Image (cartoon, helix red, strand yellow):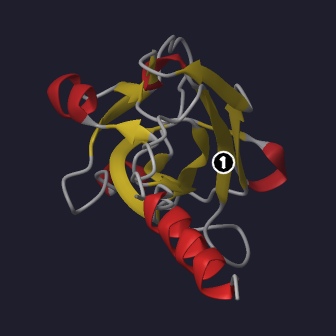
Amino acid sequence: MNAPKYLLLTIAALAAAPAAAAIISTTFGQGYSYSEGDTTFAIEPYDGTGPALGGTLGLRVNRVEVEPAEIVLGIGETFSLRDIVVHAWGRDNTYVENAPLIVTLEAPDDLIDFELFNEDGHTLRADQPGLGRLWLYSVAPPVRGENYATSLVIIVNGQRARTQPPLLY
């Protein structure tokens, strides 16, 4: 009977297969939308409290627009979050300057390496191939309903290293 041999081979193959990375959602940055004359996205590491709201009292955000819609990287390549263009709009589609934002990554836990971000406050490095989302949440109260959130897609191209299966003798 060959069933135990195939069972043993199946178990060995599953044990040798790389484990899928856990999906995380981590808030790591805070910043403000563009104001007139801005050329970079004002972002800094998240300090646990979020961006200051004092200068934005009475501000209402109806939507947030972000460009580019996607970031495509290869393994080891970097991207500066200062290159993202972020605009906020309020009531009657009026332009809102300096709308406070929270930045969250929703992705496999090994997609992005935060080492450079922790050093300079704006650079992300692609660590493993995969797909994730970078969410920008408005902290200012909305015109109606929930606080506005928009995302951009992060695509990391490449080949994930595969481990060799154990030799069975």
Q: Is residue 156 at all visible to an observer of this figure?
A: yes
Give the quarter of the figure containing the C terminus: bottom left
Q: Amino acid at mark 1?
A: Ser
Q: In the rendered image of this protein, does residue 108 appear above or below residue 157?
A: below
Please tell me which residue lies in front, 119 or 100.
119
Please tell me whether residue 65 is drawn above or below residue 140 in the rendered image. Answer: above
Q: Position of residue 100 (x, y in %)?
A: 44, 48
| Residue 9 percent across, percent down from the top left | 57, 69
Q: Is residue 88 visible?
A: no
Crowding near the residue tagged with mark 1, few <14, some 14–19, many ≥20 C-alpha atoms within 10 Å: many
Judge by depth and name the residue closer to the eye, 111 or 13: 13
Which residue is painted at 30% across and 57% down in the image? 50
Q: Quadrant of residue 109?
A: bottom left
Q: Is residue 155 above or below residue 37?
A: below
Residue underneath mark 1: 151
Taking the image as shown, residue 89 lies to the left or right of residue 5, namely: right
Residue 41 image position (x, y, % from top left): 47, 25
Q: Residue at x 65, y 61 (%)?
A: 148
Furthest residue toward front: 1
Q: Could you tell me how many numbered marks the image carries? A: 1
Q: Residue at x 22, y 32 (%)?
A: 115
Tell me the SS state at disc 1. Answer: strand
- Image quadrant for the N terminus? bottom right
Q: Residue at x 37, y 57 (%)?
A: 27
Q: Does residue 113 appear left or right of residue 57 in this picture?
A: left
